[in-house]
Amino acid sequence: MGNLTNKAQWVDTSGNKIHAHGGCIQKFGDWYYWYGENRMDDIYVSCYRSKDLTIWEYRNNILTIHSKTEAVKYETDLMLVRDKDGDYGPVHELNLNRVDPFNKVNIERPKVVYNEKTKKYVMWAHFENGVNYSCARACVASCDTPDGDFVFHGSFSPLGNMSRDCTLFKDDDGTCYFISNARDNMDMMIYKLTEDYLSVEKVVNKIFVSQNREAPVVFKHNNLYYMLTSFCSGWEPNQCMYSYAKSLDGEWKQLEKCADEITYDTQPAFSITLDGGQILYFGDHWSGGEYFSSSYVVLPLEFYNDNSIDFKYVNSFNIENGKYLIKED
Ligand code: GAL
């Protein structure tokens, strides 16, 4: 086990920089899997795994421009690269007639959950056409194994809504929810997914209306549903805020500030609950201009009796036996 320094350039067991931005970590069996954006070459999403959350082994580029495609909805678009005019088209033709240099689309904030019924690992992410940010769609992919080659099921507008920054939340009863920005980032939608997690079934709530929140992170603590979000300022950091509710379709409390006014120069990516019960904030330390220098920050969340939360900056840490330990410099 090794100490990790927040905002440093973390590397995998082969010494290569870890590219898993805007992602998520899920425990499947004995392993933690870390999924995230990787904009290198023909890659979209990379996967690493670890037993202790500090030593990461590269596993696979699970979504690339060459990924197999298979529609799950008739109105779905299967494009993973664009033709030379930037036009949409069926992915098999585009891949065969790929122009050089090819035009990639954008796949952002990928989140993966396991579906016990279908035994599939299902990914949802934010999809843009690679030209501008006007596409505003969700996309879905799935695989039989956590780190295999995912099949791309296409991009679409959930129930006709725009969809940008997003996350997934799987509740204790196995129901899965997709949470994403709609109406040009004005509102946050909470959708219930279908049983196979491949489509949206219905809207269960519309929250933070006209408040321009993005980067949603949802977790459960003490029977309350919490959400951490940022404001919309692109790659520039801003004040993280949180809210909570007794149920996802219930009333969410007014947003309150946590961390500092630039969230220690990070934006929420996801949270993870350790075996010992601690909940960690996982943030992206973006370098917008030099995307590949972007790094990560992991901090323990603090909970108070009045259901408020906060987190403080820590330079170095280790995770030992399911516990986050602050390391003195
Ligand atoms: C952020 C968003 C990121 C990325 C970035 C691009 O606001 O949370 O996921 O889309 O903008 O400008």
Image (cartoon, rainbow, N blue to C red):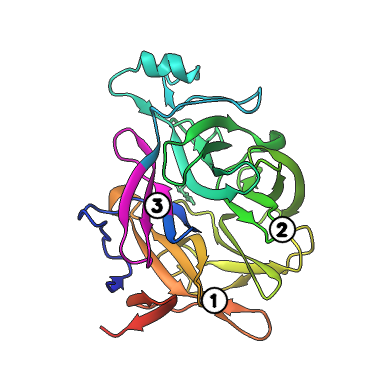
Q: Position of residue 292 (x, y in %)?
A: 29, 49
**Crowding near the residue tagged with mark 2, few <14, some 14–19, many ≥20 C-alpha atoms within 10 Å:** few
Task: Using residue 212 as the reference point, say whether residue 300 is left or right of it.
Answer: left
Residue type highlighted by circle 3: His
Earlier residue among tags 3 and 1 = 3
Q: Residue at x 45, y 17 (%)?
A: 92
Residue 142 circle label: none
Residue 173 circle label: 2
Mark 1 Cβ inside 8 Å of ligand 1: no
Evaluate if marks 2 and 3 touch, with contact meaning CB atoms under 8 Å apart.
no
Q: Residue furthest left?
A: 15
What is the spatial separation of the Cα atoms under label 3 and label 1, in whole angstroms? 24 Å
Residue type highlighted by circle 2: Asp
Q: Please, what secondary structure does the residue beneath circle 1 have?
A: loop
- Magenta region: 34-60
Q: Is residue 143 above or below residue 241?
A: above
Q: In this view, does 177 lie above or below 296?
A: above
Q: Which residue is drawn at 29% across and 72% down?
A: 1
Residue 277 circle label: 1
**Crowding near the residue tagged with mark 1, few <14, some 14–19, many ≥20 C-alpha atoms within 10 Å:** few
Please say whether residue 9 is one of the residues in the magenta stretch. no
Residue type highlighted by circle 1: Gly
Q: Which residue is drawn at 52% across and 76% down?
A: 278
Splitting the image into 4 quarters, where does residue 70 fall?
A: top right
Q: Residue at x 42, y 36 (%)?
A: 149
What is the spatial separation of the Cα atoms under label 1 and label 2, in whole angstroms? 19 Å
| Front-most of residues 165 and 151 | 151
Q: Position of residue 47 (x, y in %)?
A: 38, 48
Earlier residue among tags 2 and 3 = 3
Q: Name the residue under label 3.
A: 21
